[in-house]
């Protein structure tokens, strides 16, 4: 009886909620869908290779610092999402205002790269891109990685 009441209350709550939670959905592309809804442009490994070769746009790794030091995309800078607000406020990282910025994290289902991109947009950066596949897609596409001392 308790299970039936809980199910009814859950359905009623979802019906009254705006926006409603989907009963089923493409969770594999959840990060990409959120980026698209927020107006964040998605890029793939080709754009990241171009950024490495030209030095533009800047590449930011949103993973924790220890993960960055273990391995990262060449030319990437570490800007862990959980420290990003503090680092941006205290000017511990200089991004400039005009260049494009690519953010990424560990894998396609990791949302730290997207959260960092959204934070940068709220902070006034207008040309923020997301490499949603992250380090996993980078390695699968044949991209090399490097470690920091």
Image: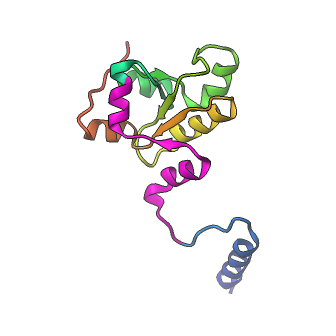
Give residue 107's quadrant in the image: top left
Q: Residue at x 32, y 29 (%)?
A: 49
Q: Residue at x 34, y 40 (%)?
A: 136
Q: Quadrant of the N terminus?
A: bottom right
Q: x and y percent of residue 52 in the render?
A: 35, 22
Task: Indicate how the structure is coloured in the image.
Answer: rainbow
Which SS does the magenta portion mostly show? Answer: helix
Q: Is residue 130 left or right of residue 50?
A: right
- For the view shown, which residue lies furthest in the left direction? 142
Q: x and y percent of residue 117 in the render?
A: 57, 36
First to last magenta residue range: 24-51
Q: Is residue 66 left or right of residue 52?
A: right
- For the view shown, which residue lies furthest in the bottom direction? 1
Q: Is residue 62 left or right of residue 126?
A: left
Report if residue 92 lies within the magenta region: no
Q: x and y percent of residue 37 in the render?
A: 59, 53
Q: Quadrant of the C terminus?
A: top left
Report if residue 27 lies within the magenta region: yes
């Amino acid at each position: 009886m308790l299970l039936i009441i809980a199910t009814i209350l859950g359905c009623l709550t979802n019906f009254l909620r705006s926006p409603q939670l989907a009963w089923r959905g493409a969770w594999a592309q959840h990060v990409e869908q959120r980026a698209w809804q927020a107006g964040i442009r998605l890029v793939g490994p080709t754009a990241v290779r171009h950024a490495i070769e030209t030095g533009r746009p800047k590449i930011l790794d949103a993973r924790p610092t220890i993960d960055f030091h273990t391995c990262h995309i060449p030319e990437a800078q570490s800007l862990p999402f959980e420290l990003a607000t503090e680092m941006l406020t205290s000017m511990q990282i200089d991004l400039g205002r005009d260049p494009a910025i690519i953010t990424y994290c560990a894998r396609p289902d990791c949302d730290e790269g997207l959260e960092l991109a959204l934070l940068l947009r709220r902070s006034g950066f207008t040309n923020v891109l997301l490499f949603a596949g992250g380090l996993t897609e980078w390695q699968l596409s044949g991209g090399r990685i490097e470690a920091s001392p």
